Image: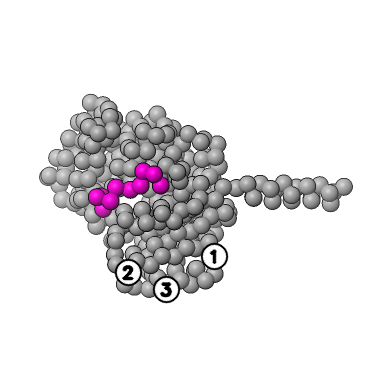
Amino acid sequence: MVYKNILVGLKGRMKNRSNNPLASVIMPAYNAVKYVEQATESILNQTYKKFEFIIIDDASTDSTLNILKDFRKKDKRIILIQNKKNLGVTKNLNKALELVKGKYIIRMDADDWSYPERFQLQIDLMEKNPNVVVSGSYVEVCDSKLKTKYIRKYHHDDTNIRKHIFRYSPFAHPATIWQAKVLKKERYNESLTTCQDYELYFRVGKIGKFMNLDKSLLKLRIHENSVSVVKNDLQWKNTVLIRFNAVLILGYNMSKFDKVYSFLQELCIALLPVKLRFILFNFIRRLNLY
């Protein structure tokens, strides 16, 4: 009787696994030799196993490609593409979208680290909330050695996410999961080399709902080559333009507070040096009060 119950339990688990939706992980990589091994291992060690891992090497000049080739030999879920010339993050993401076969698309960066339960929790959320087009989570902002500095929190529900969308990005991009059919249709705006995710959130927000898990599922590494550091000046300028386009083209409404906030950001762009802007934004963002 006990043996029979065990068999029934095993059959039930196998059935559930076979019904699990396929996820497609997309990760661009460029000269990430210091971090790509940790990032890749964190994906391959997920408790949720049914995924394809699409990696685009953007013509790296270091050993990034060799490291990825070694991983591909060991795990057939990896689909490795090598660019002959450097295309940049935005074009690489769209290139990866053309290869996607899964129901959901999970973003990852080559210098970050995902917790093992990340995929399972995010896919469970999407399965239970079919009207959600993109979802994220809290992230641990870390130094180059993955030592946590602080936890960056995000609003959980659609109403509050939309309320604050003009003040800061509603998601940590490398911690997001998307409905594949929506992302493949909308795609990233290739005219943007930064903030391509922020612009996309406004567009997909017209199609479905937003949601964030109130749990940290990713370690977000900040180092000297991070986009938020290297291209901070361009990020600020693009952010302001994206917000105006959201109002003028997509029909979003800005509150009086949001208008004042955006104006103050424009002043910061004009008056403050990049490093001071970066420090100020992160300080205000951590307060999470506005």
Asked if labels 1 and 3 touch by Cβ distance under 8 angstroms, the answer is: no
Chain part drawn in magenta: 184-193
Q: Which amino acid does label 1 sit on?
A: Lys
Asked if labels 3 and 2 touch by Cβ distance under 8 angstroms, the answer is: no
Q: Which of 181 and 157 is in front in this view?
A: 181
Q: Which of marks 2 and 1 is in front?
A: 2
- Dominant secondary structure (helix, strand or loop) of the stretch shown in magenta: loop
Residue under pointer 3: 66
Q: Position of residue 58 (x, y in %)?
A: 34, 64
Find the residue positioned furthest to the left. 271
Q: Nearer the viewer, residue 227 or 204?
A: 204
Secondary structure beneath label 2: loop
Which quadrant does the C terminus fall into?
A: top left
For residue 166, the mark is none
For residue 76, the mark is 1
Snapshot quadrant of residue 137:
top left
Find the residue positioned furthest to the right. 1
In this rendering, position of residue 87 left or right of residue 39? left
In this rendering, position of residue 231 left or right of residue 35? left
Secondary structure beneath label 3: helix
Q: Which of 83 and 112 is in front in this view?
A: 83
Colouring used for the render = one colour
The residue drawn where x is 39% and y is 62% is 56
Q: Is residue 179 magenta?
A: no
The residue drawn where x is 39% and y is 70% is 64
For residue 84, the mark is 2
Q: Which amino acid does label 2 sit on?
A: Lys
Q: What residue type is labelled 3?
A: Asn
Q: Where is residue 86 in the image (x, y as percent from the top left)?
A: 29, 65
Q: Where is residue 262 in the image (x, y as percent from the top left)?
A: 21, 35
Q: Does the magenta stretch include residue 189?
A: yes
Whether 166 is drawn above or below 191: the answer is: above
